[in-house]
Amino acid sequence: MADEQDLERKFKDQCAVFGVYGHPEAAHLTYLGLYALQHRGQESSGIVTSDGSSHCIEIGMGLVQDIFNQDKLALLRGDMAIGHNRYSTTGESHLKNAQPLAVDYSLGSLAIAHNGNLVNAVQVRSMLEASGSIFRSTMDTEVIIHLIAKAESNNFVSRVVEALLQIQGAYSLMLLTEQEMVAVRDPHGFRPLAIGRLDNAYVFASETCAFDLIGAKYVRDVEPGEMVVVSPDGLKSFFPFPKKTAAQCVFEFVYFARPDSTVFGESVYSIRKQMGMALAKEQPVEADLVIAVPDSGVPASLGYAEESKIKYDIGLIRNHYVGRTFIEPSQQIRHFGVKIKLNPVRQLIEGKRVVVVDDSIVRGTTCRKIIEMIRGAGAKEVHMRISSPPTTSPCFYGIDTPTRGELIASSKSVEEIRKYLGCETLAYLNRERMLAIFGANKEKFCTACFNGQYPVTMPGMDILQPDLFESVS
Amino acid sequence: MADEQDLERKFKDQCAVFGVYGHPEAAHLTYLGLYALQHRGQESSGIVTSDGSSHCIEIGMGLVQDIFNQDKLALLRGDMAIGHNRYSTTGESHLKNAQPLAVDYSLGSLAIAHNGNLVNAVQVRSMLEASGSIFRSTMDTEVIIHLIAKAESNNFVSRVVEALLQIQGAYSLMLLTEQEMVAVRDPHGFRPLAIGRLDNAYVFASETCAFDLIGAKYVRDVEPGEMVVVSPDGLKSFFPFPKKTAAQCVFEFVYFARPDSTVFGESVYSIRKQMGMALAKEQPVEADLVIAVPDSGVPASLGYAEESKIKYDIGLIRNHYVGRTFIEPSQQIRHFGVKIKLNPVRQLIEGKRVVVVDDSIVRGTTCRKIIEMIRGAGAKEVHMRISSPPTTSPCFYGIDTPTRGELIASSKSVEEIRKYLGCETLAYLNRERMLAIFGANKEKFCTACFNGQYPVTMPGMDILQPDLFESVS
Amino acid sequence: MADEQDLERKFKDQCAVFGVYGHPEAAHLTYLGLYALQHRGQESSGIVTSDGSSHCIEIGMGLVQDIFNQDKLALLRGDMAIGHNRYSTTGESHLKNAQPLAVDYSLGSLAIAHNGNLVNAVQVRSMLEASGSIFRSTMDTEVIIHLIAKAESNNFVSRVVEALLQIQGAYSLMLLTEQEMVAVRDPHGFRPLAIGRLDNAYVFASETCAFDLIGAKYVRDVEPGEMVVVSPDGLKSFFPFPKKTAAQCVFEFVYFARPDSTVFGESVYSIRKQMGMALAKEQPVEADLVIAVPDSGVPASLGYAEESKIKYDIGLIRNHYVGRTFIEPSQQIRHFGVKIKLNPVRQLIEGKRVVVVDDSIVRGTTCRKIIEMIRGAGAKEVHMRISSPPTTSPCFYGIDTPTRGELIASSKSVEEIRKYLGCETLAYLNRERMLAIFGANKEKFCTACFNGQYPVTMPGMDILQPDLFESVS
Amino acid sequence: MADEQDLERKFKDQCAVFGVYGHPEAAHLTYLGLYALQHRGQESSGIVTSDGSSHCIEIGMGLVQDIFNQDKLALLRGDMAIGHNRYSTTGESHLKNAQPLAVDYSLGSLAIAHNGNLVNAVQVRSMLEASGSIFRSTMDTEVIIHLIAKAESNNFVSRVVEALLQIQGAYSLMLLTEQEMVAVRDPHGFRPLAIGRLDNAYVFASETCAFDLIGAKYVRDVEPGEMVVVSPDGLKSFFPFPKKTAAQCVFEFVYFARPDSTVFGESVYSIRKQMGMALAKEQPVEADLVIAVPDSGVPASLGYAEESKIKYDIGLIRNHYVGRTFIEPSQQIRHFGVKIKLNPVRQLIEGKRVVVVDDSIVRGTTCRKIIEMIRGAGAKEVHMRISSPPTTSPCFYGIDTPTRGELIASSKSVEEIRKYLGCETLAYLNRERMLAIFGANKEKFCTACFNGQYPVTMPGMDILQPDLFESVS
C-alpha cells in the first residue's frame, strides 16, 4: 500500500526507456511507448529523434500526455527515436535532470536515456572534473556521456564500450547518434530491457506492455552484459564486458512492472499470482474473506484466495481521481490520507475474518491505517499477508527507496511489526519460496532489498545510507 | 466497456450534488464531498457558501482538485455550503452551464445544484420568456430558479414548492439561501440523495461514499417527493407533492454509483455482485476462466465466477494514466482506442475458453474491439455476459445516453448483436431476474432504458429522440 | 500621473464598445477594434457575433490579445459582431461581469455591450426583482436587458426604446439580435460613440482610433439621444427620447481618449495641446525646461512649451515593460513605486528650473513622489502645471473615480496642495478657459468632476459617496 | 522604426547582465535590475545566487516579471547574485540557451552571464570537442566555461584569465563562484558594463538605469580589458590582457541603450539629442513640422527641431498594448503591420511639410510603410532624416543584425533608398559628424556597422555572412 505522502506510487519509480529504429512514425511510436510506461516515471519525459543527420529534442516536466502534442511530435523528425520517463521526486524536480540527455561532442550528436543507477558515479565524476569536465545536471547519467566524449577510439561503438567499462552499477541504456542506436544492459542485468519488431523496425522498451500498445512483437530481452547496435547495416549483438552473475531485480515482479508485461522472460501477472499461492501454502489462516490492497496487491490476493479456497472479494474501493495535491481540512478526519485513495465496502467486511494481501510494506504507516480502517468497517479479525519477504535494505540500483532506518522491517521483527500494525496475524512470503517460483532461473535475481546481499558494492554506500552499515556487520 | 470516443466513462454521467449545514469547515467538506463524487461529473465543479448574510461562489471547468486550492477555499466563508459536479459533454462545454447556479432575486441570494433532468423544461422556459424572463445558460435548472423568483409567496419554502409543482421529470436538488438549505427529490425519486450527520452538522450527498471520506454517518435517504429544510430552527421534513410511484434509477446499480456507496438503501457492490450471480445461474456456460471488463464489470464478474465455480482472473489490465486527449498515430494500429485503456494478459488467456463480464453494452463498437483483442491474445472461445438487460431506450431523466438509433440493442436481436461482436455466445441478465434481487422493493425502480416504459412522458420526447417513438408503438 | 497602486492607468477606465454590421470578417474586425481600444478597459473582453440565425460568444478575462486566438475567432461565425472591453477593478474581477452580456428571451437571442453608468440601476433592479427577475451579475447593464425582455411591444426596436425610457444616466450601447444591430447614446451623450464605414459595412466604436486600424472611414458620431438601427433594410436613425442638454464628458479630452482619436468631433491631440497653450498663457512661469509626466501629460506639455517659448525635453523616461504585478523588495527603496515606471534624465534636469506638466491630479501621492524624484535628480525649482481644473468631485457616469474624500482637491486649496506636493509653484487650467477651447460647443460638456454640477442626479448619490454632499450645499 | 516582423524591437537585442555582491536581498535586487534592463533581451531570464557554499538557480523563458515570483525569489538564497536577460530570436528559442549558464566543475560551482559575441567560438569549440568536451547548448558562452574548467591553474581568477586569453570578440561577463564574483570586459570593450555601490554592496549592470531603480550609485565603468574581482577580501582590479584599441559600440547611443542610462560615461539621451542637432545642421530642410518615429527617434527629433527652429509635434501615436502575437485578418488592410503599432494624427499632419526623424534604417520596408501612412494622413511633403549614418554592414560583436544583403544601405545609394521609401528628401548623419559629438573620445568607438571596418576579424566571417565580403574588396 502507498505511504500517505505518496498516494500514487509506493516507491519512487526507476524510470523507463524506449527506442525505435527504422520507422517513419518513430517519434509518435515513442510517445505511445512512453505513455504505456508512464507507471515507471511521472516527473518528466523526453524524446530525441534523428533524421540521419541531426537530432530533434522535446523534453518537459509532467506526464507524457501533458508534455507532447501534435505540434511537438511533428517537430520530431526522423525514423529513429529514443525516449525516457523519469521518476517523481518530492521537493525539487528540475528540467535539467530530465532525459534523454542530448549533447554535441567531437563525433557529432549523442543522446542517452538511462534506467538504473551507477554506484561509482561520484568517483568517476570527480575524476572527470579533475580533467576539466563540467556538469550541468546532478544525474549520474551525465558521467557516461562524458566518458564517451573523452574515449580514445574513433569508432562510436568502441567508445561506448570504453566508457561503460569504467562504470559500475545498474544501467539499461538507449543511445542515439545521427545514424546508430545502441541498447545495452549492465553485466548484472539489474534492470529490464526488451527487444521487439514492428514491421521492419526494431523497437526497445523497459517493459513489453509498450510493445502491446503499438502492436509490436516481443522478440527477446537484451541480455545482461549485451550491447545491441542497430545501424544502416542492421542489428548486431556484442558481449564486450567481463561476464558477471546475473542479478535481475526481483522487485519488478513484486511491485514495479505492469502485470500485463513480460519481464526477464516471465509474465509479471503469473509470477505475482504464484507469489500469492505460495504465500497461502506457507502462511494459511482460517478466514472468511480475502481482499487486496489495490492495485498492486490484487494478483497475489487472487492467488492466495485460489490456493486457500477462501472467497475473494473487493473489500477496498479505489478512487480513480486521486491527484497529486490535496488540501487537507484543518479538522482531523480519521485515516484521512488513506481514505482519499481507498474506501472499504462495509457490507462485505462487517463481521468477517479478513485476509488482507499486499505486495510489500515500506514504513508501515499506511498499512496500519488501512488495517484500522478495515477494522472500523466491522472486520472481526484482520490477517495481513505480504506476498514478498520483509523489505530490510535500501536499493542502490535505481530504485528510490527510503533509507534503511525508515524501512520498518530493518529494525523490527515480524511480531513487532504486527503489533505496530494492529492486526491479528502478519506473515510474509519466505525469500526461498519466492525464488523457487522462478525454477531454474532462481539464481539470476538480485534480492538485496530483502537480505542486504548487494551484488555490487559502492564506495560511500555507508555515507549515503549511514544507518545501513551500522546494523549490517 | 467504454466506447472509444469516451475512454473514461461509458455514459455521460449525471452530476453530483452535495451540501453541508452548520459546520465551520463547510466549504472544505464540500470540496472533499465533491472529490469523492468526481465519478459523477468531470466537466465542471462549483461551491457556493453562505455566512448567514451573503453568498461566496467559486466555479470552474475541470476536476475538483484542479479548480479549488487553499486560497479559493479560504474565500468561501460560512458554515453552510452546497456543491455540484457536472458531467462531461463532448464538444462545447461552457462555464455558463456550470453549477451551482447563483443569483440575486427579490428575497435575496439563492443558489441551486441539480442532479436530474426536467422533461417539461422547454415548455416552461417558453412560458417564462413570454413573461419577460431572460436566460443566460442552456441548463434546464435555470427554469427552476426563475419559477422560484416569480412565485407569489413571501415565504421561501412555499416558493420552492410552488415552483416545483410546475416542473416534471427528475430532480435531486440542493438549494441555499443566506440562512436556509433545502434538499428535495422529485416525487418519482429518479436520482438518489442521502442525508448524513457529522457531529452537529447535517450533510447531503448523491452517494454515501462522500460521507465516508469526511467521516460523516449515513442516516437515511431523502425520500421520493420529500423536501427537507434545514434552518436555524433545525431540520424539518415536508411531502408537498402529490404521491407518485417510485421510479428510482436502476442504472445506478448497473453502472453509475461507486461500488462502496449505499444507494436507495442498498450496497451497490452487493447488488452488482448479485447481478453477476443471477447471470451465472440464468446464463451458464462451459469455460475455463471468468474475466471482467474493468472497472465497472468487476463486481458482477466476481459474482459470476463465484456462482459458476469458474476461476476468476484479471485478464485485462487497465492503464491508470489514461487522460482526456490522446494523439493518434497516422499509421493504423489495431484496436488502438481500446489498447490505450486496456491490455490483455496473454499468458492467462491463451488457449482458454473465456467468459467476459461487463455491466452493459451501448453501441457495441468498443465491446467488439475488446472481444477481438481477447481473441488476439489467444482465447479459444469468448463468451460475453452482460449483467443487465439489453439497453434499448434512451434516458430522459438525467443520463446523457446516445439516441435510440445508436443503442445497438434498440434495433438488433441478441443473436444479431452476438454476430456483430464476434463472440461464441452472448447473454444478458433478464430484467425480471435483475429486479428480483431487490426483493420487496422491486417495483420501486425505473427500467425505462431496458423496456422503454417511461414513468414520466414529455412533450417532444419524439422530437428530441426522433427514432425513439418510431419503433415504440 | 498614475497613483502608485495603479501604475498603468490613473483612473479605472470606462469601457469600450465596438460593432460591425455586414462584413464577412466581422469577428476579426471586432477583435482589431477592441485591440485599438484596449486603453479603455483591460480587465475582460468579449465578442458576440450573429450569422443571421444564432449567436456565437467568446468572453474572457485579460487583454484582447491574450483572450482571442485564431481558433476562437474562427468559432465566431457571421457578418455582424459587437465587442466590449471592460475596465480593471482592484480586488475581485469576475467573469460574470464581463460583457457583452448575451441572453435568450422571448424574441430570441440578444447581446448588449455598454459604456457608461446608470444612476437609477439600484431602483430599477429592485423593481425588477419584485416582479420576479433574477440577476446573475452585479452590472447595471443587466437591468437594461431585463427591461427589454419585459417590454410589451412585439417589435424589438420599440422594446429597446421602452426599456431605455426607464433608465437614467450614461450609456453608449451596442445591441445585437440575430439580424439587427442597435447603437444608441443616452440623451445627454455622456460617453462617445462614432459611426464609420468600411466598404459596405457599418462600423461603430467608442473612439475613431479603432476605425484607423481597420481602415474604416469615420462618418459622424451617434448623436446624444440618437438610436441607430442597422438591419437588412439598411441604417435608420431615431430620436425617441425627450431632448436633454448635451453633457459630453470633457475628461475624454483631459485623459481618457487616445490622442490620435477624434471624439465628439474634435481631435483629442489638438484639444489637449491647446489646453497646454491656454495653461501657459494663464499660468506662466520663469523656467529653463518644460517636461511632461508621460504619456498623458505630453501633448499639453508641448503646448505649454510652444506657447511659453521654454525648451521642451524628455525629462522622465518611461519603462515600456511595466506589467501588472511587481514584487517589492523588503528593503525600502526611495520612490520605488514611481521608479518602476519612470526614471528622470539627470543630465537634463540638474541645476534647472523645471516646469512639469501633467493632465490632472487625483490623490496627489504619486505626483508628490515624482516631484521629489525630479528634485532628487538635481532640479533647482519644480513648477507643477496641470492642464485641467482641480478634480474635486467623483464621476457617476461611467468613470471609476476615487471617492470625494480621496480627491486631494476636494478638501484642499491649491496652496495647500502645493505644500503637500513640495513644489515651488502649482497651477491648474481654469474651467472657463478650458471650455473656451471648444468655442461654440462649450456648453455641450459635463464638467461635474471639476465643479460638482451633476447633469443627472441619482437617488442615493449621497449614500454611495457619503462625503460628497456634505461639502456640497 | 521597427521592421514589420518585429513590432517591438528593431534589432534582436544583445542581452543584459547584472550582478550584486554583499547584499542580503541580492536575488531581489537582481530581479529589479533585470527588470530595468528588459529592453536588452526579452526571450529568457535567469538568476544564480550563492550563499557562500552553494548556488541556487532560477531560469525561464519570457519576461522577467513573468518568470519570477515571490516563491522563486525566496528560493534564491545568499547575498551574491548574477542575472541575465537574453534577446529574442525568431523561430526556435530554447531554454537550453538561457543564461546564466551554471555548472559544477573541479573547483566547485560556477555560473556565467555573457553579453557579447565571440568571433572564434566555432574554432575553440571544435578544439574542445576534440579533447573530449560535450556541449549542451548552441551558445558561444559555453566555450568560456569549458576553457575555465580545463585551465591548469588551481586559482579561479588565474583560470579565468587563462580561458579569456584563448577567446576573441565581444564579451562583458559576470562570473559567480561560491564566494567570488568576477566582472570583465574584453580588451576592445565592445559592450558596456558599469560598477555601482548600494550601501556596502557592489553592483554591476549593462546600463546604469538598473542602478537608478534599486537606488544604487553609479561609480564608474569596468574598463575595456579590465577584470574586477570581488571576494571576501573586497574589490580588486586587474588588467591581464594585452592592450587593444578601444572599440565601444556606438550603436548603444544610436538605438540600444535606454535614454536615461549613462553608457561609456555619457548620457544616452544627451548624445542622442546632439545627433539630432548635428543632423539639423548638416541636413536642413524647409518644413512646417518635425515628428519622430517613436520611441527610438524621439530624442534626435527634439534635437532636430530645436536646432532647426521647426515646430516639434507628436505626429505618430504608439499603441502601448502591442504584444508579441497578432492575428492578421485575411482581408488586406493597408499598412496593417505598422498600424498595429503606430497611428498618425491626421489633424496635425494634413497639408504640412513634415520632417520625420528616426534613428536608423534597416531593411527599409517599415520606413516605407510609415512614410506612406504619413502621406495618407495628408502630408504635403515628407522629409526623412536619420540620426546615424547608413547601416551598411552586419555586426559580429553581439547584435543580431540582418545579413548584409538585407541591409538596404549595403547595396543602394541614398538616392536609391529615397526612391524606394517614397519621400521628398532623405538624409543621414555623417559618420564623422556623429563621432565629433564624443569629442576627445571619438577614437574609442566601433563603427563597423557603418563602415565595415571590423576591429576584430574572425575566420569564417565570410561564410556566416557570405554576401558581406563579396561587395567589400
Image (cartoon, coloured by chain):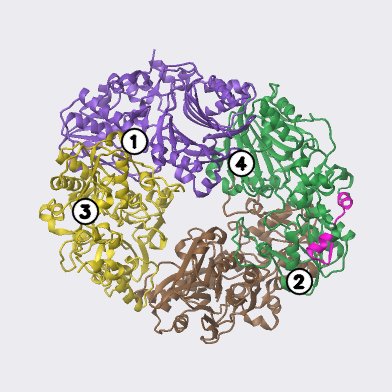
Chain colours: A purple, B yellow, C brown, D green
Q: Nearer the viewer, mark 2 or mark 1?
A: 1
Amino acid at the residue labelled 2: Ile
Badge 2: chain ID: D
Which residue of the protein is positioned furthest toward the top in this rendering? A473
Q: Are marks 1 and 3 on the same chain?
A: no
The reply to whether discs 4 and 3 touch (Cβ–Cβ < 8 Å) is no
Distance in Å between CA atoms under marks 2 and 3: 85 Å
Instruction: From this view, report whether residue A27 is shown above or below residue A422.
Output: below
Residue ID at (87%, 45%): D442
Task: Check disc 4 and report the residue beneath it.
Answer: D46
List x then y, in percent, for residue B50: 34, 58
Q: Which residues are magenta?
A: D416-435
Badge 1: chain ID: A
Task: Check disc 2 and report the residue beneath it.
Answer: D349
Give yes or no for residue B342 being in the magenta stretch: no
The label on residue B415 is 3
Amino acid at the residue labelled 3: Glu
Q: Residues within 10 Å of mark 2 (few under 14, many from 20)?
A: many
List x then y, in percent, for residue B47: 36, 56
Q: Are marks 2 and 1 on the same chain?
A: no
Q: Nearer the viewer, mark 1 or mark 3?
A: 3
Badge 4: chain ID: D
Residue ID at (27%, 39%): B379
SS of the residue at dot 2?
A: helix
Which residue of the protein is positioned furthest toward the left in this rendering? B440
SS of the residue at dot 4?
A: strand
Instruction: From this view, report whether residue A120 is shown above or below residue D311.
Output: above
Does any portion of residue D183 appear in the rendered image?
A: no
Task: Check disc 1 and report the residue beneath it.
Answer: A260
Distance in Å between CA atoms under marks 4 and 3: 68 Å
Q: Nearer the viewer, mark 4 or mark 3?
A: 3
